[in-house]
Amino acid sequence: MSCSPQLSHRDFVAVLSRCSTRAHLEQLHAHAFVSGRAAAQTTTFHLLRFAALRLSCLPYARRLFDATPNPNVFLYSAMLSAYVSSAAATPSAHAHAHGALELFLRMLRRGRPAPNQFVYPLALRAACAVGVRLVRSIHSHARKSGFCEYDVIRTALLDGCSRYGMMADARKLFDDLTERNVVSWTALVSGYARAGKVGDAIVLFERMPERDVAAWNAIIAGCTQNGLFVEAVGILGRMVDKGFRPNATTVSCVLSACGHLGMLKIGKLIHCYAWRTCVGFGSSVLNGLIDMYGKCGNLKGARWIFDEVSDRSLTTWNSLINCLALHGRSECAIAVFNEMRDEGVEPDVVTFVGLLNACTHGGFVDEGLRYFELMQHEHRIEPEIEHYGCIVDLLGRAGRFEDALNVISNMRIKSDEVIWGSLLNACRIHRQLELADLAIRKLLELDPNNANYVAMLANVYSEGGLWEEVRKIRKSVKEENIGKKLPGCSWIEIDRKTHRFYSGDDAHPESEDIYDTLDDLAASMEL
């Protein structure tokens, strides 16, 4: 690419917009330096934004900024925007957020230029990734500076409050806005969904006067995160019917829902859409595809996607390991883990959950204990409750109850339902009724009104022939009005429609035929 030494500002910007590589950018930057144009902050502004936002080259953008003697407020805004955008798009979100906050603090210390209504929202977005105290601190500074009356700052603060579950504060900020745009509505919808108030999120979403793709993504993600997988897929259908085009975020969320529901056909349709529209090349979509195919039992499809990924992230490796472990392909999961280490990828807490699950399902007790030690001593990863649960399950299934109890007593964190539930499952396999009684009583201490645990205790006593104890439990259930046991649920996909069934449920339109068929099957088994 060649540049004339007499480029006007308009021509300079036009040439910059046609750059496609860092080499082009450096050539144009050199031309600006030689011609004296680089001294103008408007030139630096355009170069900086192009380097950060178009080429994702944040270090180059920061060098441009640092080389400017007295950067104006527009350069500060551009650099802050670059950090915030990078934090949203890369795994190094925390580091980029800290970079933005360090720059904001430098701006405050120097006093010139002073932050304006465009700087504060960027600082608030960076603070959201670090902690609620910083959000409050920047809000306080903006209020003292007289900028809190701007809706753009209130919206950024609303987003910060909602991210940390302060929904009362977020709602008050929303209600006080003079003009509510799609960004503020979406921030509140996302906040309610993150707080687990998905019903409120859906009601608010339905009231939105206008929606964009981000708004649809917020409600689809909220449904997926809160276990409303059928609803998430249904909302995708509405989104498409309204003429909106799903993007990578939409695809990732719906793939997750399809994986949980076992909706392989719809998952394949979404895969085709991602391929045709070229939204399927990002890591989130590729990882979502591996997860979806794996959870739906199509391990061949999961492995094919994995093999097609040239630049595999840690999440990509974890997705395949967990899929293989989920379906009992223990040796394959361990082989993938070894392949991952050979390529120099450092495992994390998620990796070892999948690996220990693989050992549990495969009955590889010694290997599981070795990996548990490897995790702590070689990789310096502190075990979390899921890791302890895997080890207790591993030892319990092997009948090594003394070792399992030793693990529980030596845990560095408080045992919960995962631990005692794993032990209980092993006790029922090996008919260790006395230890099962202990596990259930520990579960009841954690959740005294859980009818499922009470029913389990009654079953343990009945298996041991302790009918008087069974009678006492049933009497206490009636007297203390303990809630009903949660019904089991299963689902099946037929002709791209998901049918859900609950135990004892007669609400399904074909329930009479279903029960007649079940009765016929039961009768045939007795013959």
Image: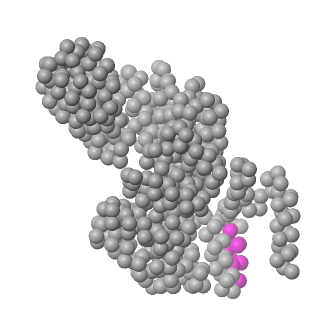
**Residue drawn where x is 63% and y is 56% of the image:** 262
Q: Nearer the viewer, residue 74 or 503?
A: 74
- Horizontal side of 176 relative to 58 (left or right) equals right
Q: Which quadrant is home to the N terminus?
A: top left
**Residue drawn where x is 33% and y is 62% of the image:** 343
Place of residue 236 in the rendered image (x, y in percent of width and height, measured from the top left): 61, 40
Check if residue 470 falls in the magenta segment.
Answer: yes
Check if residue 327 falls in the magenta segment.
Answer: no
Q: Give the residues drawn in magenta, as a range.
A: 467-477
Place of residue 69 in the rendered image (x, y in percent of width and height, measured from the top left): 12, 25
Q: Is residue 327 above or below residue 112?
A: below
Q: Quadrant of residue 299?
A: bottom right
**Residue drawn where x is 63% and y is 73% of the image:** 456
Place of residue 308 in the rendered image (x, y in percent of width and height, measured from the top left): 46, 53
Q: Is residue 155 above or below residue 263?
A: above
Q: Quadrant of residue 145?
A: top left
Direction front: furthest residue? 2
